[in-house]
Image: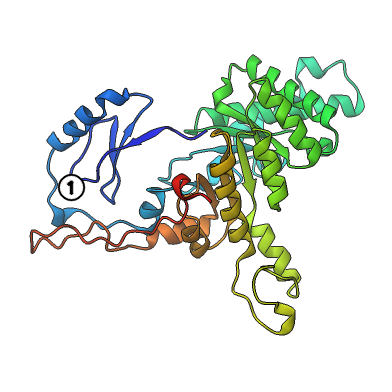
Amino acid sequence: MSAAWAQAPTITGFRCPADCHVSRTGLIRVKSNSLPGRTLRRHAGVCLASAYKAPSSAPSATELDLLEDFTNVVPDTALMASGEEGVPMKAGTSSCGVLRGILNNPADLLQYKTAVERALVYDKCANLFGAEKAACQLDKALVNVASLFASQVEGRVSTEVDARTAFDTEAILARGRQLVLEFEDAEVPPEKYLLRIPATWQGIQAAKVLEAEGVATHLILIYSFVQAAAAAQAGVSVISPNIGRIGDFYARNPGAIRNPRGPREDAGVVSKENPGVGLVQRIYNYVHKHGRGKTVVMASGVRTSAEAFELAGIDYMTVSPRVLKELRASATMSGYNDGLSGAASADEGLRRGLSPPKAQ
């Protein structure tokens, strides 16, 4: 799902050609899918030969720049059109919620509304009736919208398998395979989409079968370590524990123990433990220590910058538009040099808490 990047040594103050990118923190990234590994050093040299940029004219990095050195940050927005301006969309979602949003905002999203309306007159659904016809039209609408998104995002579009099938393995497989056929008809390559499946036991078993058939899956609604471990063992492509909803549970149940290994809150101790962040950290470490090297972890429902910083290094995270705006507006001293001395730029880097070598 993620774009493959190779990292060259940190060099500040230079601009690279198209296949090289220097982040504001000075980290050179070379797109490894366009440059063979053996040419990495040579192309890093091309970066060095590019026009020099005086340290005093280089802006300092924002908190978002620092975070993106370690993690793919994805705006947690329901619709493509609601993404923050200037932020490249790394992934997209096509779900019933997205379709509802499209139909409720037809003036701003006419292209997507047309894609949904075309599904209602899809010829393959014409001779069906009742629930079967509705299912056919729903799947076609999801694929139509996902096909548009696929041409606009860097990565993949997570496309929903009807959630009403969540406790029926065979039904999930049937609907999932139908979505794959619709994507083939729309000429959307497999590397541009994932099938979005609830992480019930039946959903995990269906995902295991689909992955064996070469179909990438995205397991959602993960609120426990057991769900995540089972999904990773099944070889799914992406698992998404939801920090925000876990936090909502503890907010509604203040007497619940946040950390079984910590002090007992029912004894009057107030815990500062964030159960959602702790769960995601545990899942990440398990996946990268015991996984098959295929599964990536995408933390969803990240609602504060503090949660984002605690998860620096995770494969992907989705953050709310408010947090994204806050991170982009917060300048740091990293990469800044006032030009009055020959010393290296100030370094106020973000500590990477998660990484495959540290996984335990």
Q: Position of residue 68 (x, y in %)?
A: 40, 49
State whether residue 180 is above or below residue 55: above
Q: Residue at x 47, y 56 (%)?
A: 324
User: In the orientation shown, which residue stands out farthest toward the bottom?
Assistant: 268
- Residue 240 seen in render: yes
Q: How many marks?
A: 1
State whether residue 347 is above or below residue 147: below
Nearest the viewer among 101 and 76 is 76
Question: Which image quadrant for residue 81?
Answer: top right
Residue identified by numbered label 1: 13
Query: Is disc 1 surrounded by few (<14), some (14 to 19) or many (20+) residues within 10 Å?
Result: many
State whether residue 157 is above or below residue 344: above
Q: Position of residue 289 (x, y in %)?
A: 54, 43
Question: Which image quadrant for residue 334?
Answer: bottom left
Nearest the viewer among 128 and 255 is 255
Q: Residue at x 40, y 45 (%)?
A: 86
State whether residue 327 is above or below residue 13: below
Q: Residue at x 85, y 38 (%)?
A: 167
- Residue 103 seen in render: no
Q: Residue at x 44, y 62 (%)?
A: 326
- Left or right of 197 in this view: 50: left
User: In the orientation shown, which residue stands out farthest toward the right?
Assistant: 130
Q: Position of residue 92 (x, y in %)?
A: 57, 38
Nearest the viewer among 19 and 107 is 19
Q: Indicate the amino acid at tag 1.
A: Gly
Colour style of the rendered protein structure: rainbow
